[in-house]
Structures are given as C-alpha cells and as structure tokens.
Image (cartoon, grey):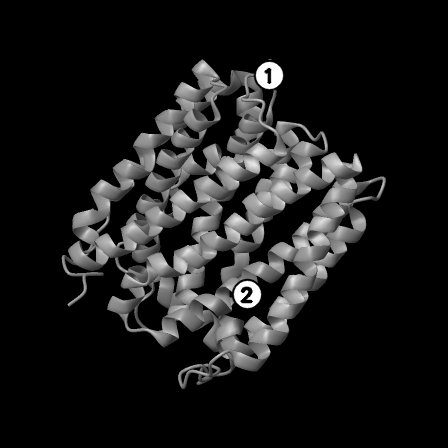
Amino acid sequence: MTLSVVMYKSLGISNTAIAFYTSWLNLPWVIKPLWSPLVDLIRTKRWWIVSLQAVLGAALALIALTVPAPIFFRSTLAGFWLLAFSSATHDIAADGFYLLALPPHQQAAFVGVRSTFYQLAMIAGGGVLVFLAGSWTEAFGDPRRAWLGVFVLLAVFLVLAAIYHGLVLPRPAGDRPGARSAGLAADYLQVFAAFFRKQDLGTILAFLLCYRLAQAQLVKLVIPFLLDSRAAGGLGLSLREEGILYGTIGIAALVAGGLAGGYAISRQGLRRMRWPMIISMYLPATAFVALALTQPSNLALVGGALVVEQFGYGFGFTAYMVYMMLVSEGEYRTAHYAICTGFMALGMMLPGLPAGWIQDHLGYVKFFLWVCLATLPAFVATARIKVDPGYGRRT
C-alpha cells in the first residue's frame, strides 16, 4: 500500500488515479471476513502463515517483472491485487496466531510491541526502500529500473521468510482446525451469525467505520503532498528526503507512539485512555494545515511536524486495536477479529477513494482543513462505545 503510492507518484501518475486505484487495494481486507472462517476451520494458522508468505514472494516477483512493461500501471496493479488478497489472508492467520498464544491482558500489553514490529517493516518499506529507489533512480537515470530492483529484493526476502518460518515458527497447542459440528457450511454461517448477534452491534460498527475516517483521507495524500512541487502546493521533497523524513523518522515516531499507547492502556485501561488517545491522534493533524500554508524549506521543521503527527497517530490507534480485541472475545476469536479488521479496512477504503479528487479540486490547504473537519464522527463514535473499566489493564 505504501510503496504503490510512492512508486506511482514517482512514475507520473496523477493524485486522483493514485488515491482511487490504491484505495481499492483495501478491498481484500474489507471482504476477508468472507473467507476468514475457512482459515479457522481448515488447516492450522501456522500452515497458512508459511504457505502465504511463499505466495507473497511470488506476487512481489510478478510486480518486479511488470514494472518495465509498456502498460505497467495496469500490469503492476494486477500484481498488487494478488499481493493484497494473499496479505489479507495472511493477516487472518497471523492475528489468530497472536490471539491463541496470549491471555487477554497480555494481548493488550503487547499491542505496542506487536505494532512496533509492524512499523519496523513500514520503516523498511516506506523509508529504506524508498530511499534506495531514489538512490537507484539517480544512479541509473531510470525510475522503472530502480523500482524493479526494489521489488526483486522484497520477493527474495519473503521467500526466505517462508523458509525460515517453516523451520522455526512455534506450534501452540491451541493451533488446530476448528471443530465441525454440523458440516463446513453450517459452521461457516454460525461464525457470522455469532458476530452479528453481538450486543450494541450498531455502536461497534459505527466506531470501526468512523474512527479513522479523517486519517484514511489524510494518509492517501501525505506522500503526494511531500513530493509535489511547491508550485503545485507541495513541499518539493525528493524521494530520498521523503524516505528519510516520513518513511523512516516519521514511522519511528509512529512506533514510539504505539509502544506508549500499549503501555498506557496496560496501566490505565482502555476506558480511561480512549479520550486522551483520540485527541492525540487527531490534534497533531493540524500540522499539515500549517505545512501547506507555509511550505517550509527547512527539513528539520518538516521532520518535526511529521514526528509529532505520527507519534500522536500511533498513540491513538492503539485504542482501536484493543477495542477490536474486546469485540472479538468469545468463541471464534480469530474469525471475529478478522471481521473487525474487515470493517476497519472498509473504513479506510471508502474515504480514501475520493480523497485524491477532493484534493485536486480544493488544493492542499483546504483539503487538510477538510480532514480536520472529518474528525468529528470519530469523536461521536468514541463517546458511544461501552468498555468495561478494567479492560486492557494489567492486573
């Protein structure tokens, strides 16, 4: 998702097309609940994890091979679609593996640690590899050749990861296919029925869909804003500068925010921390309004604003992850967590689809003001959720 935006921007694709087509890549995460019960009922989570890492490697290789093609946009999108479906299914298995291994209070406490390793991958992908693509573009004079090299590296890494995990990944006692009491089809429907019978379902869905309504629009245009020329309202950063400031330093701040959020919930509980977290998530977003108005050339100032915004986002997003764990408690935890993440992805996809079109018509300053206004539904949804006072707090 991150590299597709950067790559297409560097290869001359418009903001409208980038936001629209890359937002559709969220679709596999939206609909993954449709097959999440099958991951629960067929084979072990470990088997799914190892097998799908090999498929991910193949999808990355396909993208590498099609970057130099004359119709590269459509060809690489096909590779990203295969990558998205494989990754979404891998997500189901990996989430289930996590939920099987730890009791609830440790799940909440280790959310920050889990998020850290996810964000380290984001630093590697959105920072190191973007910097590498920029360096190779300058060296080769051909951005397509540079991106081919980047995706070859990723493909090799994922294949090696599949081999490594096939050898060393633990085998929890609880990691086994679910029991089938009335046949696969009946069990499949029972998983969904159990979720949609949850108490206060409307409030749950409103929170899952609205919490990141503003962030879903912001994240699609941050990289184009940083890379666009000053004449177009952007900051005119190079790929290397963007890779360092946003893809590395910014993501490091996101990691720190996630760790701080996990620690805070483990000490105070989700109910007490939900308001500080949503405020910390969205108040720093006003930094982009200031950046668009002033268009500073001082990289330290730009980096500082990105650090504040990303730390706040990492801290605030922890509440969302812990709430999904709360909603998923009970039977079919893996499938119900996947259903929650499906609604999370829908909450990212739908606002992201028109984000580029909105920005193209409003300009960056008014677009970032619109993002600030779009935070209001998240505050309303947060006020309505019900959380046990002790949930998430370490006992």
Q: Answer yes or no: is residue 201 visible.
A: no
Q: Answer yes or no: is residue 61 visible.
A: yes
Q: Nearer the viewer, residue 101 or 135?
A: 135
Q: Is residue 154 above or below residue 306?
A: below
Residue 395: x and y in percent read: 15, 68
Q: What residue sits 41% from the left and 34% below the top?
A: 214
Give the structural element (helix, strand or loop) at label 1.
Answer: loop
Residue 267: x and y in percent read: 17, 57
The numbered disc on residue 157 is: none
Residue type, mark 2 in image: His
206 relative position to 219: left or right: left
Residue 357: x and y in percent read: 58, 25
Which quarter of the figure has residue 47? bottom right
Q: Nearer the viewer, residue 95 or 295?
A: 295
Q: Which label's residue is closer to the chain start, 1 or 2?
A: 2
Give the structural element (helix, strand or loop) at label 2.
Answer: helix
Residue type, mark 1 in image: Ala
Residue position marked by numbered label 2 in the rendering: 90
190 relative position to 77: left or right: left
Q: Mark 2, residues whose alpha carbon is within 10 Å: few (<14), some, or many (≥20)?
A: many
The numbered disc on residue 232 is: 1
